[in-house]
Amino acid sequence: MGKSAPSIPQPPTAAQTAAASGQANTSTAAAQTALNDTNQVTPYGTTNYAPTGSYTDPQGDTVPTYTQTTQLTPLAQNLLTGSEQTANTLLPTAQNLANQTATATTNPLNFNTADSPILNSSPQLIDQAAANATYNQQASYLNPQWQQQQQQLQDQLSRQGIGVGSQAYGNAETQFDNAQTQAYQQAADQAISTGTQAGSQLFGMAQAGQNQNIQQQQLAQQQPLSLLSQLYGATPSTPTQPIGSAAQSGISPVDVTGATATSDQAALQQYQAQVAAQNANTGALGGLAAAGITAGAIAI
């Protein structure tokens, strides 16, 4: 009796492979969590991990769950409590500052100040008041001087016998008038120069005043925000994570798909070898039987 034909290997279905892979990943994740949940003790307090239950994943596997508990030292706990109480006390003030900040930062700067009319004019502005004051001051000195000089000129001409209306009298008066005009013109020029200098100074003062006004408006905008920032930084800091991060250990998940493919390939190769061996045996037996038939025919 011949041997039965080898069975064709049946690979697992995709659902079976996926289920096995999910179970392996779940087990790996649970082991990873348990391995890295290391209890820690520091000068600030302690952190402990404890299993507190489990849940069932979509594949039906049970996964343990853990609870992390952090306990501060008495001093650290007092600091945290005090910090929270201080922050709670400052909350109304912080809200008021936040409202002021929202209002202040949305108000545009006002460049139309009391100095704007001066700044809108030319930097070479003449201060007419200063020019008039300078000219009037110079004129107050010149008027009596030229009145006296005119009287002296008329007396001199009279003593010299030069009559009014004569050519010589007219020439003398013309020279006198020219000198007087030049003197008053110099006084006017000096007044204009003084007025220009005063105008430039006035323009510079207006610029400085405008800049100061703008800076004051910017300060008014920024002050609530600055106070709010200082307020948030005024509370004492307390470590909310008293435990440093523990060294993490990694576990690579099982390659179920790869392992299944390797197993299937090995089973297929074994099946193919068995088929080849069986075919070889069948061919050998067939050859012996043919040889026997041939030998009997020859003997007859």
Image: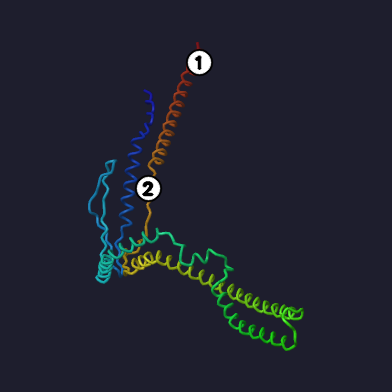
| Quadrant position of residue 232 | bottom left
Q: Is residue 124 left or right of residue 93?
A: right
Marker disc for residue 294 = 1
Marker disc for residue 161 = none
Q: Is residue 268 above or below residue 157?
A: above
Frontmost residue, 183 versus 232: 183
Q: Who's the residue at 45% across and 22% down the image?
A: 285
| Quadrant position of residue 12 | top left
Q: Is residue 153 above or below residue 35?
A: below
Q: Is residue 158 above or below residue 60?
A: below
Frontmost residue, 273 versus 75: 75
Q: Position of residue 98 (x, y in %)?
A: 33, 61
Going by the numbered disc 2, the residue's amino acid type is Pro
Marker disc for residue 253 = 2
- Residue situated furthest left in the rendering: 53
- Residue situated furthest bottom in the rendering: 159
| Quadrant position of residue 258 | top left
Q: Who's the residue at 27% across and 48% down the image?
A: 63
Distance from Cα at disc 2 to Cα at disc 1: 65 Å
User: Which quadrant, please, contains the N terminus?
Assistant: top left
Q: Who's the residue at 33% across and 64% down the image?
A: 97
Q: Is residue 52 left or right of residue 214?
A: left
Q: Is residue 239 above or below residue 63?
A: below
In terms of secondary structure, where does tag 1 sit? helix
Q: Position of residue 129 (x, y in %)?
A: 54, 73
Q: Position of residue 144 (x, y in %)?
A: 61, 84
Going by the numbered disc 1, the residue's amino acid type is Thr
**Callout 2: 10 Å neighbours few (<14), some, many (20+)?**
some
